[in-house]
Amino acid sequence: MPTELPPAFTFSQSSLQDFADCPRRFQLRYLLAQAYPAPVAEPLAVLDDSVERGERFHRLMERYWRGVQLTEQTDPLIADLWQAFLDNPPANVPQTFRRPEFSVNVKPAWANGARLTAKYDLLAYDPDGEALIIDWKTSRRLRRDILERRLQTILYPLLLVEAAPRLFGTPLPPERVRLLYWFGEDGGATESFAYSSSRYIDGRSYISALLARLRALEVDEFPLTADLHHCRYCQYRSLCEREEVAGTFEPDDAEFLPDLDELRDLIAAAAADEDFVL
């Protein structure tokens, strides 16, 4: 039986990354809505604190970039992140258009009917300058080669180029787009990725191929990943008989952990389970 997506399903960087990392995880999570039989990682309290730090810092950044007057008293859980931001804020942020927590949704012809979405922590744009996407990371900086391979790095600039005519009223050349990762645990260190026409073409081809591969799979054909690193923080590891014990949470393992929004949802789902004990 061919694969059928849920009605109005929208692909995010998280769902595409899940499929790229492990097609079986994508199937369990998004097609079968399988309940989570295992926690993301242990100790859960440390993981929960890390997620809470991320949430609070993102809320603080949203208020800051909306121009909300902030009090001198800083939330103690994120005081170090706030100080890192004050010491090393992103430089040369365009001023004409600034939107924190901003989402774009597109259904490009090359995606074969698929809907794609991106949620930007901060999107800034000057008509005569660049469009800058900023993503706040509360972890330590990942290696550049790892970041470059992530679906977030591929998808976010791509969807901004696709959405630009509707969003800004004019096409946006890929060469005027830049993605910046800001790392709070590294004192505000950054990694910047300039976009280009060749990156746009390569990204579009890669995502098209992922979507085509997904649609070509029969329901009983979704394979497990061959890379066992991806199993360490997977909620389905016991179902797949890959791991019996949760991976010990290490903030530096952000390469393999779900992103912030996904972690929040996963912890909430686990806490709602009657067998869950923290």
Image: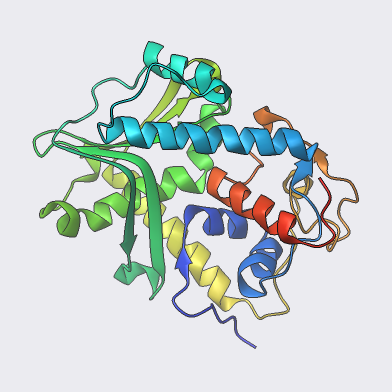
Residue pushed farthest top?
A: 87
Query: In the picture shown, does residue 161 fall above or below 81?
Result: below
Query: In the picture shown, does residue 278 fall above or below 223?
Result: above
> Dividing the image into 4 quarters, which one contains the C terminus?
top right
Measuring from the top left, give residue 114's x and y in whole percent: 41, 71
Res. 254 in view: no
| Color encoding of the figure | rainbow
Asked whether, in this view, residue 200 is left or right of residue 222, the answer is: left
Asked whether, in this view, residue 207 is left or right of residue 261, the answer is: left
Query: In the picture shown, does residue 25 fall above or below 133?
Result: below
Asked whether, in this view, residue 114 is left or right of residue 75, the answer is: left
- Tell me what residue is drawn at x 10 percent, y 53 percent: 170
Of the pair 4 and 86, the residue shown nearer to us: 86
Res. 272 in view: yes
- Tell me what residue is drawn at x 54 percent, y 48 percent: 261
Measuring from the top left, give residue 60's x and y in whole percent: 41, 32
Measuring from the top left, give residue 215's x and y in whole percent: 54, 76
- Locate residue 120: give its quadrant: top left
- Tell me what residue is drawn at x 66 percent, y 33 percent: 49
